[in-house]
Image (tube, rainbow, N blue to C red):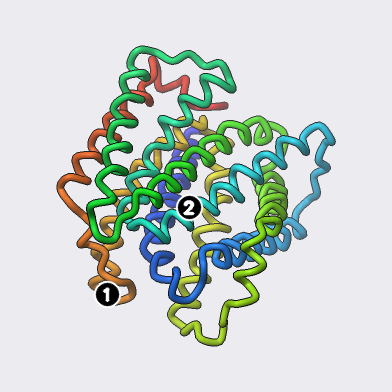
Amino acid sequence: MKFTFWKAHLALFMVNALYGASHILAKGIMPDYLTPNVFILMRVLGATLLFWIVRSFLPKEKIAKKDYPLLIASGLFGVAINQLFFFHGLNLSSSINSGIIMTMNPILVVILAYFLLKEKITSLKIAGIIFGTTGAVLLTLTSSKITGDSALGDVFLLINALSYAVYLVIVKPLMKTYSPLTVITYVFTFGLGFILLFPPTVTDLFVTNFSQIPMDAWIKIAFVIVGVTFLTYLLTMYGLKYLSPSISSSYIYFQPVLVIFFAIYFSYLGIAADYTGTITLEKMGYMLLIFIGVGLTSLRKSKKSEQIS
């Protein structure tokens, strides 16, 4: 059990490393080659097909009728709303901001757990919420003054983080009944349906000139579909099977550090544009405020209570 516990932690770290790289690589695809809506459609459609292919080789699990509403809600918040606001936010704002704002996720999980699961909010958690929210608000207000940033994009990214927090809370009960692959396959299937119902998706698809997309861009698109969508959601489901939603969400604070690392590293390799100009000391200060908030909201009376057996 202890080895499995550490494997779950490693899975969650890998998730955020892949996400950190995608913040830089996906930014280079939009809007030059794909609109956010088309990129999302390709990402979710590709991952959904991969999930169903893998699931076809494994024993089938029958879904109870009572669980379909929760699966549909998970598809809405965990895929459709989450992806739409993330890609539109990333398209408008900087990859650095997207990484920082995503660290708000654990704080949002604590707030949602209070309202949805009736979990108690302590004075430390309240202090954490204040610190984290202050950092996120100041970052957003500053974005209108810095080239490459966008206040509206940051708001979209905050909505994305909130949507993903809702997903982490509501998907947990399903993990106690079904395998991670079964859950994520249905979540993505319903999420794909919601994305197809979003009118601009089909409109943008018809006007996209796929023949003008160069090979290096296709490689980045494939990385986002297979690595950042297919693998990350599987790894997240694996982590959630053995760890609580609050631990899973707390790993997201690695993202801004990893985004900064990949921004410098990919720029050095010449495989992505140079986004290091959007890294400022002021942003690092706001990131520190959010980190403090995450730390305070994540404190527990005992480490043992965090592990889900």
For badge 1, the amino acid type reads Leu
Quadrant occupied by the C terminus = top right
Give x and y (percent) for residue 124: 33, 16
Give x and y (percent) for residue 158: 43, 42
* Residue 115 visible to an observer of this rendering: yes
**Where 53 sits versus 206, above or below?**
above
Q: Are marks 2 and 1 in contact (CB under 8 Å)?
A: no
Label 2 CA crowd tier, 10 Å (few <14, some 14–19, many 20+)? many
- Lower sequence index among marks 2 and 1: 2
290 or 49: nearer the viewer: 290
| Residue that badge 2 annotates | 86
Gap in Å between the C-alphas at discs 2 and 1?
A: 26 Å
Q: Residue placed at 36% from the left, 63% from the top? A: 24
**Where 155 sits versus 42, above or below?**
above
**Where 242 sits versus 272, above or below?**
above
Q: Residue placed at 48% from the left, 52% from the top? A: 86
> Is label 2 or label 1 in front?
2
Q: Residue placed at 37% from the left, 19% from the top? A: 125
Answer with left or right where residue 191 lies relative to residue 88.
right
Give x and y (percent) for residue 126: 36, 18
Give x and y (percent) for residue 140: 31, 43
Circle number at residue 269: 1
Quarter of the view holding residue 238: top right
Q: Secondary structure at mark 1?
A: helix
Answer with left or right where residue 5 lies relative to residue 189.
left
For badge 2, the amino acid type reads Phe
